[in-house]
Amino acid sequence: MLQELKNVKQIDGEAFRRWFVDDDLELILWYDDAKKLEGFQICYDKRAGTRTITWKRITSSDGDTKSVLLSDGPYNKSRLLAMMKASTPSLDEKLRTFILGRLETHGG
């Protein structure tokens, strides 16, 4: 189960970060100045050569806000969802639902 790290180093000029870890997953969250989630990264399969999935909220040149999910290669969507569901019961329910929703509706 993911546990939140305390005293995560914050980098000047970058978004506020929260960081969660367990044996095989890491979840990093980025928040804007208004404390709105602007992105997350899931690092998984840490024991077998870490893989990553990154979701970001972006603003296009026409001012529309969109989101994108980036992967470091093909991934098994149902397996990743199962891993996240098993590792995130301690997360705030709204945050957990949002992250799982992004994984369900993007890519695969």
Image (tube, helix red, strand yellow):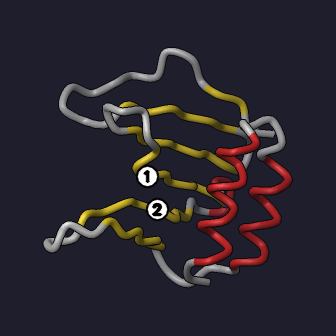
Q: Position of residue 81 (x, y in %)?
A: 75, 67
Residue at the outermost left position: 61
x then y, percent, for residue 7? 49, 15
The residue sitting at 59% across, 24% down in the picture is 5
Q: Earlier in the sequence, mark 1 or mark 2?
A: 1
- The residue that label 1 is drawn on is 39
Expressed as whole percent of the image width and height from the top left, the position of residue 60 reads: 21, 71
Q: CA distance from mark 1 to mark 2?
A: 7 Å
Which residue type does callout 1 highlight? Gly
Quadrant in which the C terminus is drawn: bottom right
Residue 4 sits in quarter? top right
Label 1: which secondary element: strand
Residue at point 27%, 69% (across, down)? 64
> Whole-percent x and y of residue 1?
81, 40
What residue is drawn where x is 71% and y is 54%? 97
Q: Tell me which residue sits at (80%, 35%) in the image.
A: 90
Assess disc 1: are there few (<14), some (14-19) or many (≥20) residues with their C-alpha within 10 Å of its C-alpha: many
Residue underneath mark 2:
54
| Above or below: residue 52 compared with residue 33 | below
Mark 1 touches mark 2? (CB < 8 Å): yes
